[in-house]
Amino acid sequence: DAKTTQPPSMDCAEGRAANLPCNHSTISGNEYVYWYRQIHSQGPQYIIHGLKNNETNEMASLIITEDRKSSTLILPHATLRDTAVYYCIVSGNYGQNFVFGPGTRLSVLP
Amino acid sequence: DTAVSQTPKYLVTQMGNDKSIKCEQNLGHDTMYWYKQDSKKFLKIMFSYNNKELIINETVPNRFSPKSPDKAHLNLHINSLELGDSAVYFCASSQGNRRDEKLFFGSGTQLSVL
């Protein structure tokens, strides 16, 4: 079973920031928070990951609460091509127990 | 260059047949995986290989047999195909020696059993 909970769907206007929440209240101290996305008919794509500090890369920002029980993925300027299912995963064991839940279906609207 | 490539992209076959899906990665990774995505879109791990050795073997019928001739390849053989095997199968790879692993996925093979 997935160790994370996410809203099943969200909408976002094109050009606006998309903020995708994830709860992981049972995360343990050595587990990382990962975000992947799956665009229709493609394989999942890595976006970003973090342990306890906030992270930013060319795709997104990851904000992790101080107690690490939840996090938010931020796409700063969503485009139509960001429409996808976004998965939040916690794992700390060499990727071997990556459990994908149902994720959040993000629809970016023109 | 495609990092993780799998073939074929589509596979349509009759019940009872035996088929294979091939996967190759050119990332120099030590660990490779097979995932299955069913009709409800849940993505579940099936197998994990590290340096040609089986690491994870989730509850998968023994009709499914992974084969790793070298660490860049992990093929999936399926015997006596059943209707319930219809799904999209994804191959993935990771370095295998870090706690913060990134998985790189192939583009998937859509298997339809008639």
Image (cartoon, rainbow, N blue to C red):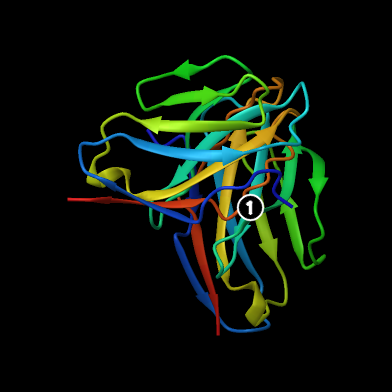
What residue did someone put label 1 on?
Answer: B35
Residue B38 vertical placement versus A85 (above, below)? below
Task: Name the residue at 59% across, 23% down.
Answer: A65
Quadrant of residue A93 within the rendered picture: top right
Outermost residue toward the top in this view: A53
Quadrant of residue B68 within the rendered picture: top right
Q: Quadrant of the N terminus of chain B?
A: top left
Task: Name the residue at 48% across, 51% down.
Answer: A104
Residue B32 vertical placement versus B83 (above, below)? above
Residue A72 place in picture, x, y as percent: 49, 32
For disc 1, the neighbor class at 10 Å (few under 14, some 14 to 19, many from 20) is: some
Left or right: residue A58 versus residue B100 is left
Residue B98 place in picture, x, y as percent: 69, 20
Residue B111 vertical placement versus A65 (above, below)? below
Residue A2 place in picture, x, y as percent: 69, 48
Q: Is residue A80 visible?
A: yes
From the viewer's side, name the closer residue of A16 and B44. A16
Q: Quadrant of the C terminus of chain B?
A: bottom right
Q: Amino acid at mark 1?
A: Tyr
Left or right: residue B8 versus residue A101 is left
The chain under label 1 reads B
Left or right: residue B53 versus residue B3 is right
Q: Is residue B17 visible?
A: no
Q: How many marks?
A: 1
Task: Name the residue at 70% across, 42% down.
Answer: B69
Residue B21 place in picture, x, y as percent: 58, 58
Residue B2 vertical placement versus A8 (above, below)? above
> Tag 1, which secondary structure?
strand
From the viewer's side, name the closer residue of A94 and A82. A82
From the viewer's side, name the closer residue of A7 and B64. A7
Task: Name the residue at 68% across, 22% down.
Answer: A67
